[in-house]
Image (cartoon, rainbow, N blue to C red):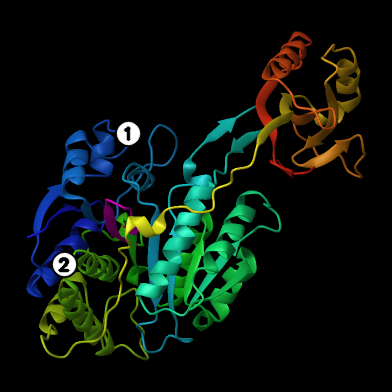
């Protein structure tokens, strides 16, 4: 009998977890449970990650976690437990099925959003460089991008899906989103039985809101996926209905889409459906698909009978408004071993199928450096005068100065953007490379001239391609 880890969480978490466990055990789930405490109480005890060492050991031992929502304190000094779990357990894929289950919802939809789960802006690498300037690093890797795209196609094939759509913003972020889209197209060629298409993320989100029935499986980057999956969940009836799957090659975590909702905690009004859906996905993952089907059928029958919690209650269509406990009782009453509705969520994909095949093998050559300096953009003339006095190696020349991606030298701009951080791009002579010692010497000269360097980005070429954006 498989042993799982269960975390009751914060806010409405304990109520809905109690409900979910009652339902799945009544349906015949064959599992053993180890309970751990996570979230607010653990943060208050001084564990900045929201989980104790003993909690980690239990997770590592059992491999599978069913987690209720938690409350993460805002502000500095603590880390998001959700992000920490995804990274440390290698949960590279987040899967959010979004399906219309309420009969008055229109249009009907049945979308699965697959979101890269470890990278992007969620890498959490941020800096304050000057009094005015803050920086957040977007991290995208070829290997992870290829893996999540390949996972999306494998998921589609295993679940009888017909189309995979990628959503990116590669018209602006040509390197990061660009490589994601490029690898998507390469992987798509390996699945001729599955249709593929692409959308820019902003119009893609709009189309989800207006015509969700036109989409099947969507794969995208971390931040975009976080946003559009909540949009899709709300369109399907309520964010409170959505369950979420976090899959790695060794570990898995199942949770509700919604937060801990402390404002309605302990009032017997929370909807347990999101966590219940997550539990169904978990049962399917551990091989108890018939039990998942029983739970799904009972839950669906309850919804169709008009028994609804407050968040989805509609006076024109609902028949009975109930709280958490009564909703649970109705679902248990509707568990039927014979009258079952089809339920499919095959989220487990063999690791060997996800190994990268398209990683670049081009020669990497250092050809320049972007030096970010603390300098008032309205005082460009003084900066140019100071730079003229600096003695640097002849192999490196000043190519441009920019502010927030806007070129201000050698070309002028109609309106000078204000910032106290400028980017000075220094480049090697054409067809030549640089040594790091030259860059170090340049930085030293700048600092000695009272030009503070707050950040450095080396510029590389990869074969005949520049590894940096044009300004």
Question: Which is the main secondary structure of the residues drawn in magenta?
Answer: strand
Q: Residue at x 51, y 79 (%)?
A: 212
Quadrant in which residue 32 is drawn: bottom left
Q: In the image shown, does 139 or 314 lie closer to the viewer? A: 139
Instruction: State the image coordinates of residue 6 (x, y, percent, origin top left).
Output: 17, 53
Q: Is residue 256 left or right of residue 215?
A: left
- Is any atom of residue 238 visible in this view? no
Q: Which residue is mark 2?
A: 19
Instruction: State the image coordinates of residue 150 (x, y, percent, origin top left).
Output: 46, 62
Q: Residue at x 33, y 41 (%)?
A: 88
Instruction: State the image coordinates of residue 359 (x, y, percent, origin top left).
Output: 54, 48
Is residue 253 highlighted in magenta? yes
| Quarter containing the N terminus | bottom left
Q: Is residue 239 left or right of residue 127?
A: left
First along the sequence among labels 1 and 2: 2
Is residue 290 highlighted in magenta? no
Residue 48 numbered tag? 1
């Amino acid at each position: 009998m498989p042993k799982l880890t269960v975390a009751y969480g914060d806010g409405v978490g304990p109520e809905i977890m109690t409900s979910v466990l009652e339902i799945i055990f009544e349906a015949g789930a064959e599992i053993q449970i180890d309970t751990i405490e996570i979230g607010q109480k653990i943060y208050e005890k001084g564990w900045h990650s929201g989980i104790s060492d003993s909690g980690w050991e239990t997770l590592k031992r059992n491999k599978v976690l069913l987690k209720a929502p938690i409350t993460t304190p805002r502000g500095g000094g603590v880390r998001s437990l959700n992000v920490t779990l995804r990274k440390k357990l290698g949960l590279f894929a987040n899967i959010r099925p979004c399906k219309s289950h309420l009969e008055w919802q229109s249009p009907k939809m049945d979308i699965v959003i697959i979101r890269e789960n470890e990278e992007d802006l969620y890498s959490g690498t941020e800096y304050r460089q000057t009094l005015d300037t803050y920086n957040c690093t977007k991290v995208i890797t070829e290997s992870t991008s290829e893996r999540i795209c390949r996972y999306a196609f494998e998921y589609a094939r295993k679940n009888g899906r017909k189309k995979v759509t990628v959503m990116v913003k590669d018209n602006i972020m040509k390197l990061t989103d660009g490589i994601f889209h490029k690898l998507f197209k390469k992987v798509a060629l390996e699945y001729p039985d599955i249709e593929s298409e692409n959308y820019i993320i902003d119009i893609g989100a709009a189309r989800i809101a207006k015509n969700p029935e036109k989409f099947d499986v969507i794969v995208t980057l971390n931040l975009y996926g976080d946003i559009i999956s909540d949009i899709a969940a709300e369109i399907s009836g309520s964010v409170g209905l959505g369950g979420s799957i976090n899959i790695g090659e060794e570990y898995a975590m199942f949770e509700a889409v919604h937060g801990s909702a402390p404002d309605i905690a302990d009032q017997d009004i929370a909807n347990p459906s999101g966590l219940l859906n997550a539990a169904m996905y978990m049962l399917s993952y551990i091989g108890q698909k018939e039990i998942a089907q029983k739970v799904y059928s009972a839950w669906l029958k309850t919804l169709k009978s008009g028994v609804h919690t407050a968040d989805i209650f509609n006076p024109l269509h609902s028949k009975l408004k109930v709280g958490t406990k009564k909703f649970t009782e109705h679902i248990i009453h509707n568990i039927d071993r014979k009258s079952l509705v089809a339920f499919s969520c095959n989220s487990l994909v063999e690791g060997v199928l996800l190994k990268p095949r398209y990683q670049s093998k081009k020669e990497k050559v250092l050809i320049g450096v972007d030096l970010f300096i603390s300098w008032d953009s309205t005082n460009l003339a003084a900066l140019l005068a100071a730079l003229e006095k600096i003695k640097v190696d002849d192999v490196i020349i000043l190519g441009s100065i920019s502010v927030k991606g806007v070129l201000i030298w050698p070309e002028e701009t109609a309106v000078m953007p204000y910032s106290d951080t400028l980017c000075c791009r220094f480049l090697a002579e054409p067809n030549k490379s640089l040594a790091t010692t030259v860059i170090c010497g340049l930085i030293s000269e700048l600092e000695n001239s009272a030009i503070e360097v707050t950040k450095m980005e080396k510029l590389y070429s990869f074969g005949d391609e520049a590894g940096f954006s044009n300004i």
